[in-house]
Image (cartoon, rainbow, N blue to C red):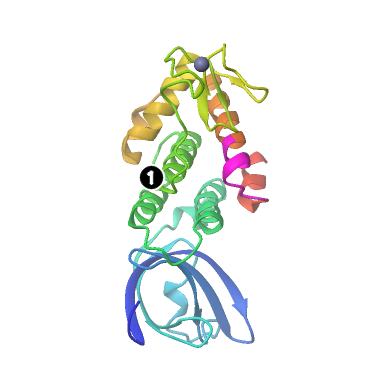
Amino acid sequence: MAGRIFKDEGLVLRTRILGEADRLVTLLTCGGGKFEAVARGARKMKSKLAAGIDLFTRGEYTFHRGKTWPIVTGQFPLERFLWFREDPELYPYGLYLAELTDRLVAGEEPSPELYRLLLEGWRLLGKNCDRVLVLRAFELKFAHYLGYSPGLHYCAGCGSSDTGGFSPREGSLLCLECRPADYINLDSGTIALARRLLETPLQQVAMIRPSGRQKEELARMNNSFFAYHLDLGELKSKRLLKE
Ligand SMILES: [Zn+2]
């Protein structure tokens, strides 16, 4: 981000009230990673900025480098993921992707893969699909792009391909011989599902039809893996999804 004025395409992950009339917007941008920016006067009725800085918006933004935060000086909404606002059942799914991204992306390191992943995830969740499965695929791919790809092919202990479960601490599959205390038994179908979700482009995940048991096991695997390596803490969306 050189110069005082810069432009980028971004996805709004979060907005907060700042002072009397401003908003602080958390954006994942295509070229500049994640950062917060001030939208001055965005809470006023006639604000030209207000429209483009809502949660679940993709927009083009112009920033002026401020002392503390960049200041949004222009915006042009490109896409609004309105289904998350209009359908209370969809809202926690969209929010989960936003919260996960906000918690795990550390700063202004450019991450175009994560940007595309979130964009595709928000688009896909608005369509008729297995949304729970989309969340699992999103988690696996997100971890992969952050450099925490779970080992889903061989036992981390001996290299055997005859694996029967997963160790969150090892972040890998293991065989029965090598299993540690935190070993989670997994059906071979669940292991195949995890691999497929990691390797298949997100848009094609909708074509996969796993069993209920496989989805439950995968949720347990992902949860424990994240809890060990990528702590998300308390998320509003997770609470809403449970309800
Ligand atoms: Zn082994």
From this view, report whether residue 208 is shown above or below residue 126: above
The one nearer the camera, 157 or 62, is 157
> As drawn, is 59 to the left or to the right of 55?
left
From this view, report whether residue 159 is shown above or below residue 104: above
Q: Position of residue 48 (x, y in %)?
A: 42, 84
Ligand 1: does it lie within 8 Å of the C-beta at label 1?
no
Q: Position of residue 174 (x, y in %)?
A: 52, 20
User: Which residue lies under the disc numbered 1?
Assistant: 124
> As drawn, is 160 to the left or to the right of 228?
left
The one nearer the camera, 157 or 36, is 157
The one nearer the camera, 79 or 71, is 71
The one nearer the camera, 203 or 102, is 102
From this view, report whether residue 17 is shown above or below residue 122: below
Asked if residue 227 is among those painted magenta in the image, a careful observer would answer: yes
SS for callout 1: helix
Q: Position of residue 172 (x, y in %)?
A: 50, 28
From this view, report whether residue 48 is shown above or below residue 231: below
What amino acid is labelled 1 in the image?
A: Leu
Image quadrant containing the C terminus: top right
For the point 46% across and 81% down, the residue is: 70
Q: Position of residue 205 (x, y in %)?
A: 36, 34
Point out the stretch of residues depicted in magenta.
Answer: 225-233
For the point 62% across and 40% down, the residue is: 228
